[in-house]
Each structure stands twice: as C-alpha cells, then as structure tokens.
Image (spheres, grey):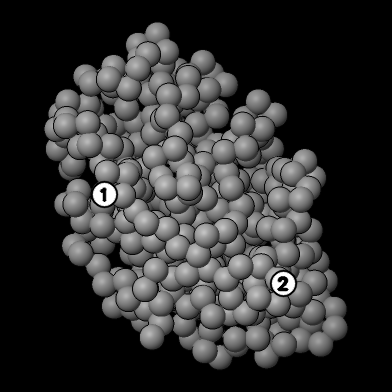
C-alpha cells in the first residue's frame, strides 16, 4: 500500500460534518438497526490480562466495519488480547459513538471520517487519535435508468444523500460544483435537488418515485440496484489510486496513554483480521453477514451482499491524505470552519505492528503527533 497519496484539486472528496450537526456516520445503511450494546457473547478471554482487564470496542453493524464485525465474530481480537476481555458495543450514528468515547463507555472505536474530524475539533484535539485504517470505498451514485442515462441528466433531478453535511452529502455537493452547477448547500435547492434522506428510508423513497437517485454508501446502493436502480458512478473512480477513507480506528487519548499494550494488541488483531478477510473472501463475507444477522436481526441477501462486499476494500492504511481532502472540501462547501487536524493521527503502534508483520508502514500526511 503506498505510504502517501497526492490529492488532485479537481478530484472529488467526501467530507466532514458540521460542528454542531448530529451526523449519521457514513457507513450507516440498510440493515443497520442495532442497540447500543452488543447482545452477542464475546469469546472467552484466556491467559494473562494486559494492563487493562477489559477493552471496550465500539463499531457499526455495517459492511464498511467488516474488520470489527469479523474480528469479533471470529475471536481474532480476543486471541491477541489474551486475558484482557473484549467488550463490544454497536452504534448507529457517529455522534453517539464519539459521546461514548468521550464518556469512557468505549475505549476504541471504528468510525467514519466525518465524526472523527468532528470529535477531534470539537474538543480542540483532546479527545481522540486516529490509530489506524479499516476500509476504503463503498460509495456509489445510483439512479433511475428510465429518468437518468448519463451524468449530465442529473440536472433538474432529485438525488438523495444521507444527511445534511454528512460525508456523501458534501461529496455530492462538491461533484455538483465541479460540473459548474449551483446548489444552495443548506436547502439543497438549485440545478439539482439534493434530498436529505435517512439510508433506511431511501429505498422506499426510490420505489415511491420521490427521488430519482442517490449518492449513498453500501449496502444501501446495492439495495437500490436490487430494486431496479442503475449504478452510474463509483466514488472510488474519482480518487487517486481509487482509494479514500470510509472507516478509521480511533482511540481515547486517555486510554492510549494508560494502556498502550492493549491498543497495540487490538491493532495486531485488526491487521490479522484484515489479512484473513482479504485471503478468505467468501468465508469473511459469510462471517460478516452472520454478525450482521446477530446484531441487527437482518442478514443481507446475496443480491445485496455480494456487490456491496466487492466495492469495499479492507485495508490497514488510514489514507490520511484523503482525510485532509475531505476536511478541505467541507470548508469549501461552507459546512465547516477550517479545522486544525494537526495531531489527529498517532500511527506509531500501527507501524510497529506492520513492521513486525513484514508489511509496509503507513503515513500520517503530516497530521501526526509531533
């Protein structure tokens, strides 16, 4: 994996949320109703505990959080932690996970770029660090093929995004601006009507004809395609190397300072989980889907699961340069004051784990702890 990437000014970027906006994390979607506590019993902890008896890990019941889904389902995190028990919790929205991290209800979390930026800037850099990556991609523009055949046909149409100011919303606003079209960011009115719609509702809105398409994450995009929509654009195609961050691993600065051995063990579990996922696609996909069924009560059918899974890349690199680009485009859209992201990354433990595993180290794009 390349250690750094150069972001073109004309490339599309996804973006962070408004500072005061309660934003649904980018990966929320179809089949993601879950309680804040995981009802599934974690594998038994065996051996000697590290410096903490328990590590509380938060994540979402979504495919873009496959590292957490599979790593916990298969006991791969627990294996690295020995006698330190994994206590998993699931969340449906980024703000609630950030609140849990700030309150000490979780120690480590898998989360999208927008709430990570939001959580860091709102606390003036005192709450969290990004310590690793987990996933890239998994965002598509899908449309009604009877109404929209080319990208130029979007003008005058109604296109859904998950929420005002969320990652896909401003990614779409930025794409519109690149086309030379005008849309008021707050109201969504203009040359294209941007209709903010919860991902769980978007498929029904599409079937009812109240929207003509959607710029959405997986598996919502594949759900729409299964109901007759057509993929018109994959956001990955708009990025250098076809990669942009969709899921990061964050940690409470307090927990990182007090229990670096536990954090390192979790990162070893993450790296080994990602290696297993990429080497065993069918088994990993089935494991993730079983975890989704346990957490949300809904397994994804093959016509949704298969294409959604293929569009997501499971990685260790947090793609730091793309996070900066996302923040820059949030500012450009007028939805975020220019944030100071210096120190948001601490990749030292991840690079230690990667080096020990014989894998390339990753870069922080100049945004690491000095």
Eyeballing the image, is 353 above or below 111? below
Give the x, y percent position of residue 337. 18, 62
The extreme right residue here reads 47
Give the x, y percent position of residue 171. 32, 43
Mark 1 burial class by Cα count in 10 Å: few <14, some 14-19, many 20+: few
Q: For this view, does 48 lie left or right of residue 141? A: right
Residue to which mark 1 is pinned = 9
Q: Nearer the viewer, residue 303 or 321?
A: 321
Quarter of the image for the C terminus: give it.
Answer: bottom left
Q: Which mark is residue 357?
A: 2
The extreme top residue here reads 146
Q: Nearer the viewer, residue 322 or 336?
A: 322
Element type where label 1 sits in the image:
loop
Residue at 64% x, 59% y is 68
Give the x, y percent position of residue 245. 46, 54
Residue at 26% x, 57% y is 328
Eyeballing the image, is 257 above or below 221? below
Element type where label 2 sits in the image:
loop
Residue at 45% x, 63% y is 4
């Amino acid at each position: 994996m390349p250690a750094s990437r150069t972001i073109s000014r004309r490339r599309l970027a996804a973006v962070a949320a408004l500072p005061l906006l309660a934003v649904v994390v980018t990966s929320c979607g179809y089949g993601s109703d879950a309680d804040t506590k995981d009802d599934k019993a974690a594998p038994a902890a065996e051996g000697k505990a590290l410096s903490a008896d328990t590590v509380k890990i938060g994540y979402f019941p979504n495919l873009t959080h496959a590292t957490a889904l599979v790593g916990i389902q298969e006991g791969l995190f627990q294996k690295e932690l020995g006698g330190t028990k994994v206590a998993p919790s699931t969340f449906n929205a980024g703000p609630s996970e950030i609140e849990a991290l700030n309150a000490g209800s979780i120690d480590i979390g898998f989360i999208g770029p927008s709430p990570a930026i939001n959580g860091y800037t709102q606390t003036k850099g005192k709450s969290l660090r990004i310590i690793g990556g987990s996933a890239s991609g998994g965002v598509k523009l899908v449309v009604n093929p009877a109404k929209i055949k080319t990208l130029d046909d979007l003008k005058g149409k109604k296109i859904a995004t998950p929420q005002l100011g969320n990652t896909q919303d401003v990614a779409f606003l930025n794409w519109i601006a690149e086309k030379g079209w005008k849309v008021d960011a707050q109201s969504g009115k203009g040359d294209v009507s941007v209709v903010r719609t919860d991902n769980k509702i978007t498929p029904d809105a599409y079937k009812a004809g109240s929207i003509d398409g959607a710029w959405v994450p997986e598996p919502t995009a594949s759900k729409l395609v299964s109901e007759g929509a057509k993929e018109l654009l994959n956001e990955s195609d708009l990025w250098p190397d076809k990669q942009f961050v969709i899921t990061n691993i964050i940690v409470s600065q307090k927990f990182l300072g007090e229990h670096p051995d536990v954090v390192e063990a979790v990162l070893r579990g993450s790296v080994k989980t990602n290696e297993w996922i990429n080497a065993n696609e069918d088994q990993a996909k089935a494991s993730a889907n079983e975890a989704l069924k346990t957490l949300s009560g809904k397994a994804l059918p093959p016509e949704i699961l298969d294409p959604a899974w293929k569009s997501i890349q499971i990685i260790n690199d947090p793609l730091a340069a793309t996070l900066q680009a996302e923040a820059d485009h949030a500012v450009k859209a007028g939805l975020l004051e220019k944030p100071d992201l210096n120190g948001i990354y601490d990749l030292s433990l991840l690079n230690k784990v990667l080096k020990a595993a014989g894998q390339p180290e990753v870069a922080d794009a100049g945004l690491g702890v000095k």
